[in-house]
Amino acid sequence: MASNYSSAMSLIGSRRELFLAISELILISILLVLAIRAGNLGFALALFLCLFLAFKHGFVRHSANHIIIFSWCTLIIISLSIPKLRAVGARKFSYLLYLYALIVAFIFWIPLGANSPRSVTPDMAIANLSHLFNVNSLQASVRANSNKNLAAEKLPTSMTSIVKDKRIDIVPWEISLVATNNLNWKPRPILQSYSAYTTTLDNINFKSLATEPRDYIFYDFSAIDGRHPFFDDPKTFSYIFCNYKLNSYLPKSIEQNKFSYPTNLLLLEKLPLSGCVPGVSTSKTSTVRWNNSQHIEVSDRSIILAQIKFTYSLFGKIYKSLFRSPPVMMQVTYADGSERDYRIIPENSENGVIVSHLPKDANEALSFFRRQLPAQVQSFKFHATNSLLYSPTIEINFLSLHIRLADSY
């Protein structure tokens, strides 16, 4: 699981911060070796595991809050190790290392500035201390902040009245809609689509929808880390497209092509039968090299899915297990000549991602669910900052699905 996370959720940050963290890893590892020599093998191994996991957490997805937690862990690990050391020289080393880790922690924290959610002011500190002696005040504060946040997720009554008492799901992630609008939520096992980053997790979500269909799905054309929204849990999304249609209700903001969250949510309703004609899929397999374009031929009323198999080299398997894999990007050339780069997830792309039509914005996504199939793709190619982590060739199996006319279901 850690290895797959290292690829699917990797985020590249400051090299300076990474080098400082690696220096801490090396120095703390030396400290733990000294603890082992002092007769604390089990203790040192346990702390080394904590150190490794803290590093993975902080620098696989290299963001401010993650590296703050790493810096806390380094200070705690050093503090716990000091009493285990008997030699005077080892203790001196541990004190100097603690000072170094403290300086590095401040280097990590300073760029966050006053806008950081973790920045502490005297007023905040006093308020937090008062909560220790007045739990009711804390509960009231949490409730007020919660209600304020949830108020932004209120949907029009005209929309919620359609789904009243019906089983619904929310794609890709805005589950706070449930609490605000009192929805009858039947969640997918992996609640948020970007977290279904392996074929196994995607299949679990697909099976849940296929065996227990939801009456309605709230869909928002959103994704993280530069991914295309269609690339998250791809098998599940293809099922949604084929088995749900756009409900007749549309907020005025959508009808006027002016989106404002949360009224840009599309309401999808279950079809009585699949909107993709079964049994007419044809498959074609090809192999493409990194940075080489793959052309797509699309017929009318059809979409093309690509089951894309990325194979890691031995070095790549070791590297992503110990650290992270750089993002894999898919450069798309549209029929109108425009180009876009989208991040694709190697661990779940083998389930089949839609490649023939990739809407560039929410308006085109709306047309896509109206079966108008905009944003046709002409070709695509893959690139990564370090392709040595992968096999030089990428295997692609194409599937073509014909779309039924709207009046046929």
Image: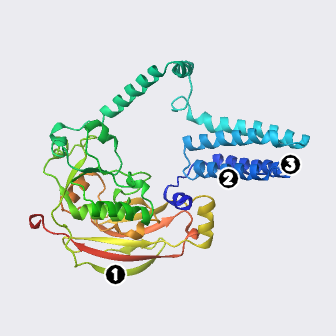
Mark 3 highlights which residue? 38
Residue 367 sits in quarter? bottom left
What number is the disc on residue 284? 1
Q: In this view, does 178 lie above or below 402?
A: above
Q: Is residue 400 visible?
A: yes
Q: In this view, does 160 lie to the left or right of 355?
A: left
Q: How far apart are marks 3 and 2 (CA)?
A: 19 Å
Instruction: Identify the residue at image location x=26%, y=78%.
Output: 281
Name the spot of residue 327 as percent of width and height, x first. Answer: 50, 59
Instruction: Identify the residue at image location x=31%, y=38%.
Output: 179
Which of marks 2 and 3 precedes in the sequence? 3
Question: In what quadrant of the picture does the C terminus appear?
Answer: bottom left
Which of marks 3 and 1 precedes in the sequence? 3
Give the amino acid at mark 1.
Lys
Q: Distance between the residues labelled 1 and 2?
A: 46 Å
Q: Is mark 3 on a helix, strand or loop?
A: loop
Instruction: Identify the residue at image location x=25%, y=59%.
Output: 213
Q: Is mark 1 on a helix, strand or loop?
A: strand
Name the spot of residue 208 as percent of width and height, x first. Answer: 32, 60
Residue 319 sits in quarter? bottom right
Contact, CB < 8 Å: mark 3 with mark 2? no
**Which color scheme did the rendering employ for the protein?**
rainbow
Name the spot of residue 11 as percent of width and height, x first. Answer: 52, 52
Give the amino acid at mark 3.
Ala
Which of marks 2 and 1 precedes in the sequence? 2
Contact, CB < 8 Å: mark 1 with mark 3? no
Mark 2 highlights which residue? 49
